[in-house]
Image: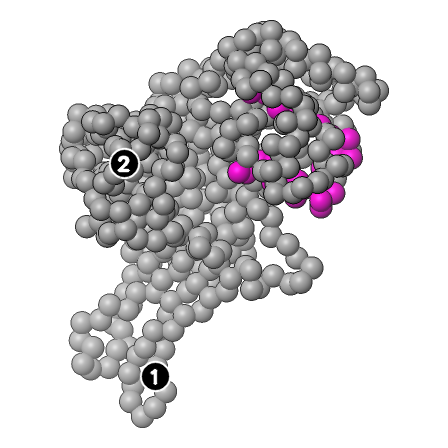
Amino acid sequence: MRIETPTIIVIFGATGDLAKSRLYGALFSLFQKKMLPSRFKIVGFARGAVSPSEFQSFILKSIRRKSAPLFIRSAAYVTGLFEELDAYKRSGKILLGFDREWKACSNKLFYLAVSPKYYKTIFENLARSGLSIPCSDGDGWTRVLVEKPFGHDLGTSEDLEEVLTKLFKEEQIFRIDHYLARETMQNILAFRFSNAIFEPLWNNTYIDRIEVKLLEKKGIGQRGILYDELGALRDVGQNHILQMLGLVAMDNPKVFETAAIRHERAKILEALRPMSEGDVKEHTVRGQYKGFRSVRGVRRDSQTETYFRIHAFVDNERWKGVPFYLESGKGLLENRVEINIYFKEIMPCFCPPPHTAHHHKNLLSFTVKPQEGIAIRFFAKKPGLHNDIEVRNLSFAYRVAAKPHETRAQAYQKVLFDCIAGEQMLFASSEEVRAAWRFITPILQGWEKNKSPLIIYNRGKEIV
């Protein structure tokens, strides 16, 4: 599907790391696949004094190309501070100029690739400058794409939501969680609800526990100032981890429609058992890798966590009593993002002596990194004269399973394409964001009161 209405993508923070490392490459891939409108423009907005040609060179370097004339000629640039209303008005003149050139009312997509502390300022200036208003009642929409985290806690999130919903309708707001756009995550729904052998077992009668992991070997890189403000729980826990949990634990939406799926994800997050200060002490672990405080921009006495582990429960009929273990961190042993579903042991088990005490738990894993795929661990008899039981694995990887003509969309390609197409299924709703912060905020408050002491760990070592 190709959108034919002329479209302008305005990127706030156009010379930042996110734009450089993710956005321009994703846009160029969509351009190559002819999945962008034939008439489109990229307008960069940042504080650096950059000429149009310098900005185009910046994009070329980002997409690792020496030349891409048809793509690059779409790029324009505005120098300005996010607090500077006149810069938004200058942007408006550029957008109007493109509309006149095309003799059409174009779509306007505003992408906030900036620190969350600038969100409110940008929202308000979009409104004051009139940029948030479509150029006609018929053609040409305006939409806003917001990176995570949306807020700093429940209170700030609700304040942002109040500002945003005064300016935009819910169908115009796209709150990004790019993990939902990955192939494995998208396939969880198809895997569960298209195969009769799994969904009847997807409950507390048969499932022992569920693990959601997002583990990274690298540290925080050059994100010292930003990361010290956030910490691991705000950076990936409130969004990636809980969205993964919501997707794997949600009830059958009955119909494959955006509103129904988002509603069921939200219901799971709303059912997360809130934590008291005692629960925070008993059911959470937080850590910080050695060397974090020496990173530029990090406070020398920082108590910011680079690792967390949470023992959570979903209080509904399906999951009553089933523990969910949520874990993420930097500076760890491996790069691995996965959801593990452990099934209960069969009793009695066909486990001939001497297996009087058996631990035969089937395991279903959805792996996002390092290689996207699905694996099932089961047990079978060993070949031979004896009745010994051994572990077997059944798995497939998307990279291997894809046919020659099939291509896997990268997460940010999917995010941008769906936003332009107006598809919100893989974006968090206001209800999901509110429910996630309602669960996370008491944990953050408990940590601030030192209810769960900060563990200092060595990089590349296992955390007990």
Please tell me in which quadrant of the rendered image residue 26 appears.
top right
Q: Which residue is mark 2?
A: 292
Label 2: few (<14), some or many (≥20) within 10 Å?
Answer: many
Earlier residue among tags 1 and 2: 2
Query: Can residue 170 be seen here?
Result: no
Which stretch is magenta?
21-46
Circle 1: residue type: Lys
Can residue 361 be seen from the camera position used here? yes
What residue sits 74% from the left and 23% below the top?
Answer: 106
Dot 1 lies on which element? loop
In the image, 389 versus 316, the foreground residue is: 389
Q: Residues within 10 Å of mark 1 (few under 14, many from 20)?
A: few
Judged from the image, the secondary structure of the residue bearing numbered disc 2 is helix
Q: Nearer the viewer, residue 198 or 200?
A: 198
Evaluate if marks 1 and 2 touch, with contact meaning CB atoms under 8 Å apart.
no
Q: Residue at x 69, y 59 (%)?
A: 405
The alpha-carbon separation of the residues under discs 1 and 2 comes to 49 Å
Whole-percent x, y for residue 123 in the image:
53, 15
282, 353: nearer the viewer: 282
According to the image, label 1 marks what residue? 382
Find out whether residue 104 is within the magenta segment. no
Q: Is residue 45 covered in magenta?
A: yes
Report the residue at 67% width, 62% height from top: 404
Q: Position of residue 164 (x, y in %)?
A: 51, 17
Looking at the picture, how far across and down is residue 154, in whole percent?
Answer: 35, 22
